[in-house]
Amino acid sequence: MQEPLDAIVLRDVVKSFRKRTIRGEYTTFKSELLRWLRGQRQPREGGLITALRGINLSIPRGKTVAIIGRNGSGKSTLLKLITGIYTPTSGVMEINGRISALLDLGAGFHPDFSGRENILINGIILGMSRAEVRERMDDIIAFSELGEFIDEPVRTYSSGMYMRLAFAVATHVDPDILIVDEILAVGDEHFSKKSMAKMTEFKKRGKTIVLVTHDLSTVERWCDEAAWIDGGYIRRVGRPSEVVAEYKQAIALAEAQSVVFTPPALTEGGGALPQVNVPGADAPVRLSGLRLLSPSGEVAPQLSPEAAVEVCVDFTTQGSYEDLVFEVALQTLEGRPLYETSTRVESVSLPKELPASGRVRFVLERLGLLAGTYVCEVTARTAGGVSRETCTFVVNSSVAERGVFRPVHHWVVESVPVSVVPALAGVGHP
């Protein structure tokens, strides 16, 4: 039998919650019980709060799909529907495959049970048999790096230890679909890299990943598709770069217009963002073909810390534009900013009228980054739209330095006159 092409399908899904009001009087269990037995039940008040309003979304098997949107737009509610924590008020949902969720790390842990006991309990909750959990127990413990603490009650764990154990359990149940809410990497820097590597392994193995995050650079760099949810509605689904650019433009436009945002449940229309043009597609200045060039003009996918490099991107113009700004940003692969600048920050004068097609060159006399993989992002921002291009590049170095950048420096080793040594050695002593 042929497997379904889509891992998750939602058709006209609506989720509503009933409002609850707090009565202005104190009650006890006894008084409530007597009122119930006498048939004096408090009438329901307040109507319904609708968090999701007719969601239609298909998530292809083996794809990584990001759900983005402002706080209160319905993202977490959508994930809880997919995982079965909530049931839809109306509509149809199809889930094809075993699901593991990272919604609230360790939400099912019992504080008085040991880490080992909680692994067994949570593994069974996530759909594994007792034998499967025991078979993978050593791998889960090794991944969590808890060592001898694995047999201690989890109430004695630090928050980082707690998260590491929960992440290890959720990612070792071998799910077909992994649901992640605001958690791509947890713990310290070492474990963050380790957890990101685990997520990348899931992608390579063809697992379906549904991710909610506010880290938009990760969405653009790491996801295959993005869905923007706003006020309980799906505003747009498509390529991450285009969806993120439109979302950013809508946020910027709303802030410029001093729009006050409220959660969708508190507004009749769902608190939707203002409608805007699709950036990139309709932006007056559009970028394309971002590449990094060596001083000789050749494409340089691999660089050295001391290399000179030219960030080069082509542009086309269509229609009128105002307040044009070109921005350049260098980031780590995890999305941490390393350097950002713009023509506005550096007071670079731009022609009032650009040609129909042209090129922007940002010249670095010395790159200065240590060995690693990085992301370069160039943005053309105008009042009428935003266009953005990104590329990944590799820096190689034969020197085993640590950190992110190599400052311009040199070493000096010199002799010190013998007469000075006793004076230095005696400083601070009677």
Image: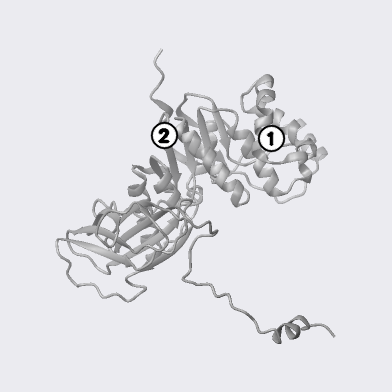
Indicate the colouring scheme: one colour
Tell me the quadrant of the picture where the C terminus can be found: bottom right
Residue assigned mark 1 = 141
In the orientation shown, which residue stands out farthest toward the top?
1
Residue assigned mark 2 = 63
Residue 306 vs 174, above or below: the answer is: below
Disc 1 from disc 2: Cα separation: 28 Å
Q: Nearer the viewer, residue 260 or 279?
A: 279
Q: Determine whether the residue tagged by mark 2 lies in a helix, strand or loop.
A: loop
**Amino acid tagged 2:** Lys
Q: Is residue 360 left or right of residue 173?
A: left
Q: Position of residue 366 (x, y in %)?
A: 38, 66
Q: Is residue 352 left or right of residue 340?
A: left
Q: Nearer the viewer, residue 318 or 142?
A: 142
Q: Residues within 10 Å of mark 1 (few under 14, many from 20)?
A: many
Which residue is drawn at the image coordinates 42% and 48% (left, top)?
269
| Residue 49 can be seen in this image | no
